[in-house]
Amino acid sequence: MSENGASPDAGEAPASYNFLQEIVAADVAAGSHGGRVVTRFPPEPNGYLHIGHAKSIVLNFGLAAMSPHGHCNLRFDDTNPETEETEFVEAIEDDVRWLGYDWGDAEYYASDYFERLYAFAVALVEKGLAYVDSQSPEDIRENRGDFHRPGSDSPYRDRSVSENLDLLARMRAGDFDEGDCVLRARIDMAHPDVLMRDPLIYRIRKAPHHRTGTAWAIYPMYDFAHPLSDAIEGVTHSVCTLEFQNNRALYDWFVANCEPPAEPHQYEFARLDLSYTVLSKRKLQQLVAGGHVDGWDDPRMPTLAGLRRRGVPPAAIREFCETIGVAKRDNLVDVALLEHVVRDHLNADTPRMMAVLRPLRVVIENWDDGRVELLRCPLDPDDPDGAARDVPLSGVLYVERDDFAADPPKKWFRLAPGREVRFRYACLFTCTDVVTDPGTGEVVELRGTWDPESLGGAAPDGRRVRGTLHWVSAAHAVDAEVRLYDRLFTTADPGAADDFLAHLNPESLETIHAAKLEPALATTNAGERVQFERLGYFCADPDRDRLDRPVFNRTIGLRDTWAKIATKS
Ligand code: ATP
Ligand code: MG
């Protein structure tokens, strides 16, 4: 990976460029902007980053890395005092760093430019290109017109420069109340593009700002602040999502008329939309505020904090973002593709150990009383001589309840009366007795015998034993809480629904309070990943400290639905 943590690596010709990489490559080749590429990732600190933001981060850092003098800035777009908080700034920094990107010293805040932005506004007023409008917000909206109807000029549109300068200064000084007046660009109220009909530049807000406190009573609008912040930073390629396509004319208008030190250009790409997921901060905020999830970092959330806690490796997110590509048309990406990439990454290097989620006791009747065998078991079954841990085997074990059938169907190779199975790395065992609760009829214990010649798990005479089960020694087992996650929504496109909350999956979280872990799992640290044999990939949760027992989140199961979808099509 390059200094910017991005790909493609400089000098290496990639198989195919996306359309933005083509633009940047051509600009670099032509020596435009002095051969420099400066991009920025511009989050508004009003929520946590989600996987859609990751697409933008991977793209922006990647484009910057195409030039040896490239750089990607982290710019907080903090022009909206009501919704922004320092908590979000810190979470965003953590998440970008975790994703693998380094913005160096280039951390900027739109609020650092408030004074310069104000000077640009004053200059527009002096040129007769901006005016203070004292219409009510309702009249401003009404007189803007719409797609079918041209707007009409404000009665305040022809105020003199000196009157406008005076009013603007008083807006800044806090002499007016919210809604009393706004500063507007003086463009054309009959412009075919509604956004160009004298757009707002400043509005009055009496809320304290998380960085500038009460220094300002007016705040700049996005369409004004964004291009000029880009220009102040010398951004060369300002990439944003498609919904800003119509704002580009305005972006260019402000750059042209404010005469900032540089001339950035805006390019638009399709935002990431993911099935069974919502990717709007407003909706994610609703999930948190409504208690539908356990905070921004709930492992069911598509936030980077949630994905991290779920156990998803950052490299998998980067690869996913590269895989989906960058296009100019919106489409819904199948979440199974993300799951596939995550599984692929976890499969490569996650140690395998044993845990039993729904324990059923098994008593080996011919096991010597008190005998304990320490079995040396590899963490990677494909590398039997590699790293290993000791797993104790004794005469009472736990196995998975699902691995027993009193009346097995055809092709059942697991536990059943009279059947022989292999306990992984341990021994061969034949079930001879099934103990049930006389009241409920529930199976409470299996009893049987082991083949003492089979210690280690191999059949002494090479006889065929098809079922291999995971297990944990009862006396050595560590109690744990295990959380099994499913998709948060039951419909493919919940974001498009009128009431997305109506599509929440009531079974998105199943908590298992008394899972049994092999003893080596007693001391894992938060964030450590492990494959529980036959069950899936899991990640240790920080709640361990609060609950005083290991807590594991299932990152993802072993079965790959994407592979199936891919072969079908
Ligand atoms: P939301 O719509 O979820 O509130 P936003 O666009 O308002 O997101 P910002 O903090 O302004 O959130 O986003 C920062 C950057 O991330 C912007 O450049 C934005 O275009 C980009 N971005 C946001 N959502 C996505 C997405 N789903 N796919 C790709 N890029 C995104
Ligand atoms: Mg935004």
Image: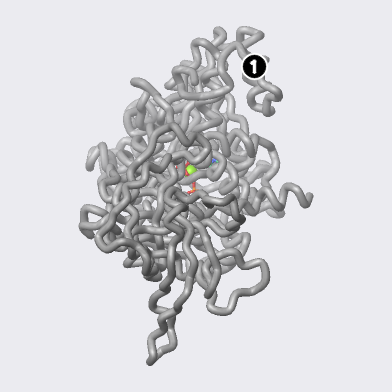
Of residues 418 and 210, which is closer to you in this image?
A: 418
Q: Which residue is mark 1?
A: 25
* Residue shown at 47% from the left, 74% from the top: 432
- Residue projecting furthest to the right: 569
Q: Position of residue 288 (x, y in %)?
A: 38, 60
Q: Position of residue 395 (x, y in %)?
A: 33, 63
- Residue projecting furthest to the bottom: 439
Of residues 63 and 381, which is closer to you in this image?
A: 381
Of residues 179 and 428, which is closer to you in this image?
A: 428
512 relative to 384 in the view: left or right: left
Label 1 packing within 10 angstroms: few (<14), some (14-19), many (20+): some
* Residue shown at 53% from the left, 75% from the top: 417
The reply to whether residue 308 is in sight is: yes
406 relative to 20 in the view: left or right: left
115 relative to 323 in the view: left or right: left
Of residues 156 and 300, which is closer to you in this image?
A: 300
Tag 1 secondary structure: helix
Q: Amino acid at mark 1?
A: Ala
* Residue shown at 43% from the left, 83% from the top: 442
Q: Quadrant of residue 161?
A: top left
